Structures are given as structure tokens and as C-alpha cells.
Image: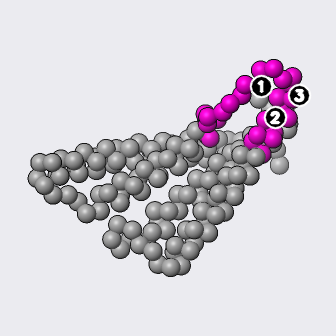
Amino acid sequence: MSRSRFGPWLERLEALGRTLEDALLVAGLGALILIGAGQILLRNVFSIGVVWADGATRLIVLWLALLGAMAASRDNRHIAINVLDRFLTYRLQRAVAVVRNSFTAAVCAALAWYAWVFVRDSREFGDTLLGDWPAWWFQIVMPVAFALIAYRYLLRAVAAIRGAA
């Protein structure tokens, strides 16, 4: 099976994923601004507040942080210290890229596994957030985000092995 057969399908899937990630980031940021501004207005002007707003704000920040990390990994825009790369030969740069990307993928895979265990246990124990909503519905972003980041860095490690840019 050649890459050309699956290329357009994978490209469409990647474009859909990119659009979904961006839409969730925009919606999350908008919700965070609306809830935060609403809480400030309600507390300062009317001396009341929405009970679930603080918990929702914390959850939205969690989602935005992980979605932002996913977007950064998607575009290879994570913080990196590459001081020595400019002094290394092309072969050594590739070797360092393989090690760096493999290590990042391994750490993110471990985080995805432990986040999955956390979410599974939360579901098993019947944890709830924002009243009576199952907590795992909101926590599922953790294993998904770390698994996707691990996958992306594993692909980068393979590309570095093959000599791709």
C-alpha cells in the first residue's frame, strides 16, 4: 500500500483535526472570557455569583492548556533550547532530533497512560464535577491530548530517522 493511496485521506483527517483543535481553542477562550467577565459583573454589581462558574473556569483553563499544547505539537512550536544544533553536523542534528523526539514521545505516552488511569478511576468511583456531571467527561482531554502529542513526536522521530526535514 503506497502513501499516495492513503495520502489524501490522511490529509483530510489532519485538516479536520486541525480545524477541530482550533475551534475548541476559540470556543474555550470565548467561554472563559464570558464566564469570567460575567462572574466579575455579577459579584461587583449585583453581589451575587454563579455557583458553577469557578469550577467551570478551572476546567476550561485545563482544556485550553492541553489544547494549546496539542496545537504547539502539531505545528512543532513547543519551547525548545537548540543552542548546540547550529554547531552540529547534519548527521548529529538528525541523531539529536531522533533522541529528543523519541524522549518527548515516551514522556507524553507515559503521561497519557497515567492520565488514562486517573480518568478510569474517576469514572469507576463515580466522581462528579459542576454538580452532578460525571468528572471523566471533563477529564478525558488529558489522556487524549498526551496520546496525540506522543503520536506526533513519534512521527517526528521516525521522520528524523529517515532524514526528512
Quadrant of the rendering where the C terminus is positioned:
top right
Label 3 close to label 1 by CB (< 8 Å): no
Q: Is residue 15 left or right of residue 48?
A: right
Disc 1 or disc 2, which is closer to the eye? 1
Disc 3 or disc 1, which is closer to the eye? 1
Disc 3 or disc 2, which is closer to the eye? 2
CA gap between label 3 and label 1 equals 13 Å
Q: Is residue 75 above or below residue 70?
A: above
The x, y position of residue 146, in whole percent, is 62, 53
Q: Quadrant of residue 133?
A: bottom left
Q: Is residue 38 left or right of residue 29?
A: left
Q: Is residue 76 above or below residue 116?
A: above
Q: Which residue is mark 3?
A: 91
Prevailing SS of the magenta stretch: helix
Q: Helix, strand or loop at disc 2? A: helix
Question: Can the viewer see residue 105?
Answer: yes
Mark 3 nearby-residue class (10 Å; few <14, some 14–19, many ≥20):
few
Q: Quadrant of residue 7?
A: top right
Amino acid type, mark 3? Arg
The x, y position of residue 129, in whole percent, is 39, 68
Numbered circle sitting on residue 96: 2
Label 3 close to label 2 by CB (< 8 Å): no
CA gap between label 1 and label 2 equals 10 Å
CA gap between label 3 and label 2 equals 9 Å
